[in-house]
């Protein structure tokens, strides 16, 4: 199971807690009055892998800078919220992202910028194009949605962030479908090579033939002994060996 830790950040009344509850439970609750941060835990399947998810929802009340920095160091990915009906919340996004980049020492921290309350079109103060341009400048993904209207868009935004985190955590992990195809091809080639080797003629043991006896094949490991050579009447060079010397009677 892959652990993923997300941090939700943004101005007050942008829908941070509503987004967390909507994602975890599927329900929408409009009013919250919290005085401390909350951590939501749940499980999801993302990219065919089981994910243990922790979502930290910080309170919008004033808190020490050290506490904010500690939360940023803890998190793997970030959800930055602003409300399309509050330009002030939109303007506060960039300083938050710069703080994240500074603490993470990288502008590539997985981040999704969420423009909430898209259902309140009559009170819009921030255009969709402004949100898209800001996301491009900050190098993060962008979603405009309404937490109160649908859970599908919320689910898609959070799952996209989870995918970004997993991709950054394991950049060398091969893509599962292509990896399996590669393995299958390698096994197929190995099987074909094995069958080809089985069809080749087996190597014969080398043989040695004495001159004049080419029609006889004698394996190396059963070469005739000198005694056998004498019995056949031929020497090592194909000549009949001389008769053994016998002492003459007169010399005795």
Image: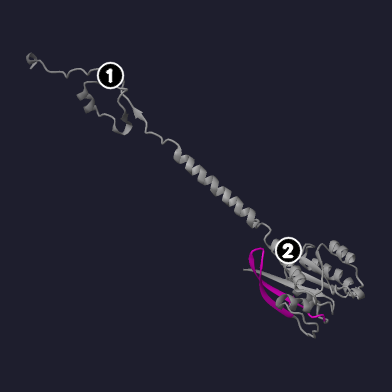
Q: Is residue 133 magenta?
A: no
- The number of numbered discs placed on residues in the rendered structure image is 2
Q: What's the residue at 82%, 73% (across, down)?
A: 146
Residue 3 on image: x %, y %: 66, 70
Which quadrant of the view contains residue 99? bottom right
Q: Which residue is mark 2?
A: 164
Q: Residue at x 76, y 68 (%)?
A: 157
Q: Are marks 1 and 2 in contact (CB under 8 Å)?
A: no
Q: Is the stretch drawn in magenta largely helix, strand or loop?
A: strand
SS class, disc 1: loop
> Viewed as shown, does residue 3 lie left or right of 94?
left
On-image quarter of the C terminus: top left
Q: Which residues are magenta?
A: 38-60
Q: CA distance from mark 1 to mark 2?
A: 86 Å
Look at mark 1 in the image and give the residue it sits on: 238
Who's the residue at 16% across and 18% down the image? 245
Res 66 visible: no
């Amino acid at each position: 199971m892959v652990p993923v830790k997300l941090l939700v950040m943004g101005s007050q009344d942008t829908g941070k807690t509503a987004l967390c509850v909507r994602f975890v439970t599927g329900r929408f609750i409009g009013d919250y009055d919290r005085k401390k941060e909350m951590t939501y835990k749940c499980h999801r399947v993302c990219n065919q892998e089981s994910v243990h998810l922790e979502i930290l929802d910080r309170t919008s009340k004033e808190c020490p800078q050290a506490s904010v920095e500690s939360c940023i160091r803890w998190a793997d990915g970030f959800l930055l919220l602003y409300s399309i009906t509050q330009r002030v919340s939109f303007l506060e996004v960039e300083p938050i992202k710069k703080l994240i980049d500074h603490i993470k020492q990288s502008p590539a921290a997985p981040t999704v910028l969420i423009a909430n309350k898209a259902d309140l079109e009559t009170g819009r103060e921030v255009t969709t194009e402004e949100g898209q341009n800001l996301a491009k400048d900050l190098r993060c993904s962008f979603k405009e949605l309404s937490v109160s209207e649908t859970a599908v868009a919320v689910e898609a935004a959070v799952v996209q962030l989870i995918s970004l985190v997993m991709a950054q955590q394991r950049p060398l992990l091969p893509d599962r479908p292509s990896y399996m195809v590669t393995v299958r091809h390698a096994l197929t080639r190995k099987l074909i090579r094995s069958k080809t080797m089985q069809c080749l003629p087996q190597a014969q043991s080398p043989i040695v033939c004495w001159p004049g006896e080419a029609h006889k094949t004698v394996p190396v490991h059963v070469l005739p002994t000198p005694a056998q050579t004498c019995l056949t009447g031929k020497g090592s060079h194909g000549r009949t060996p001389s008769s053994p010397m016998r002492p003459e009677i007169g010399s005795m």
